[in-house]
Image: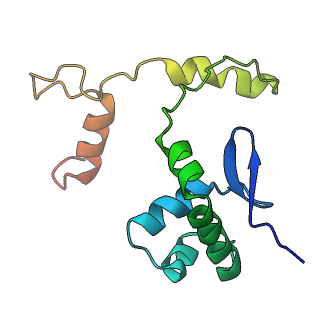
Amino acid sequence: MEKSYVEQRDGGYWITGTRISLDSLVYAFKRGAAPESIQRAFPLLTLEEIYGAITFSLAQAQDIDTYLARPLLPLEVREVEVEGDSQSSGRMPRARTPMQPLCPNPEGRRDQGPAVARVARAVSPTTG
């Protein structure tokens, strides 16, 4: 019975039944990583799966090298409207607004803003 360790889907090669790309293992192996160290980086994989994937890449070396040498296509970026509760929808505009400086007058040390002044009064033993 033949066992398949690599599957081709979505235009790439993947370790069967996972979201781990063959690219990841092949690049690590080509950099000199041992299968045991690759397993430490990918603990979801068994040594059998790692050796199987490496064997596949060596047996199909020409195809895999051509695949790895392909130019990467730019990712498609789309804005997606996300449904959420009314409380979270109000947070995004606030999160994208620029933060106010802590010190409204950075050149003048006397006017450090209310937050800094409160901390200075709380820490100073001479201030009541």
- Comparing 63 with 4, the one in front is 63
The residue closer to the viewer here, 59 or 38, is: 59
Along the line of sight, which residue is nearer the eye, 108 or 28? 28
Viewer-proximal residue among 99 and 74? 74
Task: Write the residue at 82% across / 27% down.
Answer: 85
Q: Residue at x 54, y 27 (%)?
A: 73
Total tally of numbered discs in the picture: 0
Q: Which residue is at 68% across, 73% downward?
A: 52
- Residue 33 x, y percent position in the rendering: 43, 74
Image vertical order of residue 51 relative to residue 60, above or below: below
What x and y, as percent, mark residue 32?
A: 39, 72
Quadrant the N terminus occupies = bottom right
Quarter assignment of residue 84: top right
| Residue 109 percent across, percent down from the top left | 10, 29
- Picture coordinates of residue 83, whole percent (x, y): 82, 23
Horizontally, residue 36 falls left or right of residue 60, namely left
